[in-house]
Amino acid sequence: MLKGLSITPPVIGRISIGRVVEKNGKRLPEKDDQFTLTSQIQGRDGWVLHPLDEMLRKGANGKLRAIPVRMLFNDPNLNLRAEYSLFDRETGRPVCVGNGETCKRMGDDGLATLPCPSPDGCGFGKACGCKPYGRLNVIVGDEDEMGSFIFRTTSYNSIRTLAARLHYFGAVSGGLLACLPLELKLRGKSTTQSYRSAIYYVDLGVRTGSALETAIADARELDDRRRTAGFNQAALDEAARLGFSNGAFEDGPEEAAAVVDEFYPETTHGEPKSDRGGSATGEVPATTLRDKLDRQAALLGGKAV
């Protein structure tokens, strides 16, 4: 195994609740009120839809707001990885990733381990746009039992809700999280920060038409069949745990483009660097991460990292 390379679950598709559209020559995020399943291939009009998207949509009257899924692992923290993350908005590469206690930060002198007080208490994070970032891997369909769809999010609501559900379902099922028949659900809410308009986040529950007791009984039956066949879930979890810990950052160069396209689309795709972040209304162009790092370093009396 190559050291320094994080080994992550194989991905065969993406799950999103929005898309990137082109407006006035810029690619900007546009939220949606439904799920979309795409392949890992991009065309001129965006991500190419996965065949499962059409199949699931037929049974949902056009609006895909629930997706039947299974988890890959029994350990909730392996299915959903969430950290405070700061990305270079030009390249999509991770610069600093922390868990609220410690962080790994890439600087001129290499990778450093530092205290992580969370974005609200970190001057570096405030200046450079650190925020929570989660990745959820789920199995959709029966064609590939080791191939997953990935849902990326920077939503507090989605991360907090998914983390709670995964731990709760793992607990009540006696650790059989990977065997439970579950369902991703899209929920809406309004807050003062959203100016009373609806915002959508992702939740997890038992499949529509089933009760929790029934889902747990089904999970036990599936676990028995897997054990009889020689399926070793504990070994799979351990292999995944070792793979994640093999690298400093989970997202590598190949994921960088997807990160930028989903969360920082306005700064990419061939726009002249001097025009990035500007607009026809005369707004001041957004500064780059390097500019922010240099300013922060000046305030701290040191050099940018």
Image (spheres, rainbow, N blue to C red):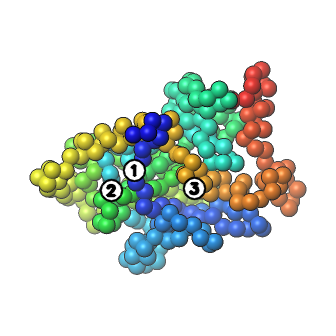
Secondary structure category for the residue under label 1: loop
Image-quadrant location for residue 44 = bottom right
Left or right of 28? Residue 284 is right
Q: Position of residue 130 (x, y in %)?
A: 62, 39
Does residue 187 sit above or below 165 in this rendering? below
Residue 146 image label = 2
The quarter in which the C terminus is drawn is top right
Q: Where is residue 31 in the image (x, y as percent from the top left)?
A: 60, 62
- Of the residues under marks 3 and 2, which one precedes in the sequence? 2
Is disc 3 surrounded by few (<14), some (14 to 19) or many (20+) residues within 10 Å?
Answer: some
**Residue at figure coordinates x 65%, y 26% from the top left:** 109
Amino acid type assigned to the residue bearing label 1 in the image: Pro
Is disc 1 surrounded by few (<14), some (14 to 19) or many (20+) residues within 10 Å?
Answer: some
Q: Which residue lies furthest to the front in this view?
A: 2
Amino acid type assigned to the residue bearing label 2 in the image: Met
Q: Where is residue 252 in the image (x, y as percent from the top left)?
A: 53, 46
**Residue at figure coordinates x 47%, y 40% from the top left:** 5
Q: How far apart are marks 1 and 2 (CA)?
A: 8 Å
**Residue at figure coordinates x 84%, y 52% from the top left:** 274
Amino acid type assigned to the residue bearing label 3 in the image: Ala
Does residue 39 sit above or below 101 in this rendering? below
**Marks 3 and 2 close (CB-CB < 8 Å):** no
Residue 92 image label = none
**Marks 1 and 2 close (CB-CB < 8 Å):** yes
Secondary structure category for the residue under label 3: helix
Residue 258 image label = 3
Residue 9 image label = 1
- Of the residues under marks 3 and 1, which one precedes in the sequence? 1
